[in-house]
Image (tube, grey):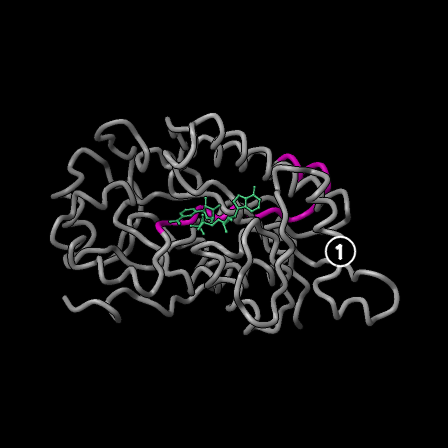
Amino acid sequence: MGKRIVFTGGSGKAGRHVVPYLLDKGHKVLNVDRAVLDVPGVHTLLTDVTDSGQVYNALSCHFGYDGYEEPGGPKPVDAVVHFAAVPRILMHPDNKTFAENTVSTYNVIEAAAKLGIRKVIIASSETTYGVCFAEGDKDYHEFPLTEDYDTDPMDSYGLSKVVNEKTARAFALRYGIDVYALRIGNVISPEDYAAFPGYLADPPVRKRNAWSYIDARDLGQIVDLCVAKDGLGFQVFNAVNDTITATIPTREFLAKYAPNTPITGDLDGFEAPLSNRKIREVLGFKEEHDWRKYVKV
Ligand SMILES: NC(=O)c1ccc[n+]([C@@H]2O[C@H](COP(=O)([O-])OP(=O)(O)OC[C@H]3O[C@@H](n4cnc5c(N)ncnc54)[C@H](O)[C@@H]3O)[C@@H](O)[C@H]2O)c1
């Protein structure tokens, strides 16, 4: 049955694909963002999520003007999806990136928990694995990258996402609610596949993304599966597609391009170095947008 979902950051690169996916699945969505999302059937409440008062309001208001036609005030919210953020380094000074991302995530999870909303899904990131925004050429500790990795980013953005995972765990423990943190890989919109031939021709450029990616529409499926799956408490899930962005099998590829990194787990065939086994096994994720559908190799 369709749920009532408050989505922060729905107007952004990922959100503008994830929100329509959720609508297609029968959910009602309120977009909470500083910019308007131009998708029929979704109202945007212009909100700054770094302001706790605005967040409490946004999580307890009508989803649109039609809400005023029904008696009884705003209906309860079933889930909050929190994507609004400064999405990388060098957009703002480091301290602002760290402060906005950590404070906004605290605000959203706290307001949800205290308003009685029992499911929160937050956008964490591949950058927690420490290589994406590292100074210089850093090696991963091991492959595959799984959710129990010792995350060690050195940049303000990756650090903010590690802190956000701790915030998620604290509120899940204190309120007994579900807070799922998605370690989202490099988000690929349909038009981004045009860049793949360049990536394939120059493998070192994708080391910072662990030669993995998430199609923005498949990210929609992952969020929908998280909305459906109750009772797991605090969880971290890697959110990536199934396979490596390379034309040779993963072990052979890594032996060539990441020779100093040990392989400590299963990596079959073309499996992505940033592992998505957990979302496949726990949530039932089945990718629909393998990059090979869109790129001639
Ligand atoms: N794009 C990627 O490759 C990638 C990878 C890993 C994780 N992520 C994470 O996924 C989420 C979505 O990323 P994206 O690429 O869509 O980013 P984006 O910048 O395209 O979208 C973010 C949206 O959040 C809104 N926003 C930012 N600060 C806000 C605030 N204080 N109050 C209200 N709205 C605010 C922006 O207006 C924008 O619409 C982010 O949390 C990002 O850190 C993205």
Residue picked out by circle 1: 61
**Which is more toward the observer, 259 or 47?**
47
Q: Crowding near pointer 1: few (<14 within 10 Å), some, many (20+)?
A: some
Q: Is residue 149 visible?
A: yes
- Residue 195: x and y, percent? 22, 57
Residue at 29% x, 33% y is: 141
Residue at 64% x, 34% y is: 170
Q: Type of residue at label 1?
A: Cys
Write down the quadrant of residue 29 in the picture. bottom right
**Which is more toward the observer, 165 or 30?**
30
- Residue 273: x and y, percent? 29, 48
Q: Is residue 172 visible?
A: no
SS for callout 1 = loop
Judge left or right: residue 31 versus residue 242. Answer: right
Residue at 67% x, 72% y is: 1
Q: Quadrant of the C terminus?
A: bottom left
**Which is more toward the observer, 16 or 214?**
16
Residue at 11% x, 53% y is: 201
**Residue range (magenta):** 170-186
Q: Is 118 colored magenta in this rendering?
A: no
